Image: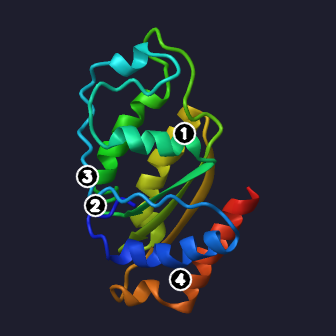
Amino acid sequence: MGSPRLNGNTVELLKPFIEELKANSVQVVYITLADKHISSCHSCYTCQNITGEYGCPQNDDMQDIVFQIVQSDCFVLATPIYTWYCPPEMKAMLDRFYGMNKFYGSGKGSLWEGKKCAIIATHGYDVQYAAEPFETGIKHLCEHSNLNYIGMYSVRDKYNKASFQTEEAINGAKKFARMLLVK
């Protein structure tokens, strides 16, 4: 969960989504980035010369996030959209995914090839205008990394938190969770 607000709109939209997954006996690991320390990528390429491991020499919370993703079947990027992209907490994590693929050094392989990836987004404006740039970036990441992009569920913020508590928003989040189970 990439919002800097641990009780904001994105969390509100995640509640029925996670509830539906758990109701279907899915093990959910919920990670909030706002309370993690994730440094930016230093472009040192150390990770690209190590096979079978993440290989980043930085000692921060990214190591645990990578471990959780590698152990998972699917990971969901839940984020508010600020200025057509995710907040800095999530952007730092996305940049640090560089070590998941070994394309640019002596290391070989991928730590996450074939995993499912999905997006849950909250935003102002309509979905195409607000969230499409972020979704396009994630689609490119998935294509480059041989991940299975499942799709995006998003809700527009019209009335603050109340926008994410409507029957339509709740049912949509639950439906999106069930869709992840069959894809």
Q: Position of residue 23 (x, y in %)?
A: 66, 75
Q: Amino acid at mark 4?
A: Ala
What residue would you read off at disc 3?
88
Q: Amino acid at mark 1?
A: Val
Mark 1 burial class by Cα count in 10 Å: few <14, some 14-19, many 20+: some
* Residue 125 in sight in this render: no
Q: Position of residue 9 (x, y in %)?
A: 36, 77
Distance from Cα at disc 1 to Cα at disc 4? 30 Å
Disc assigned to residue 169: 4
Mark 4 burial class by Cα count in 10 Å: few <14, some 14-19, many 20+: many
Of the numbered discs 4 and 3, the one sitting upstream in the chain is 3
Is residue 65 depicted above or below 54 in this figure? Answer: below
Callouts 3 and 1 close, C-beta under 8 Å: no
Distance from Cα at disc 3 to Cα at disc 2? 11 Å
Callouts 4 and 3 close, C-beta under 8 Å: no
Q: How many numbered marks does the figure carry?
A: 4
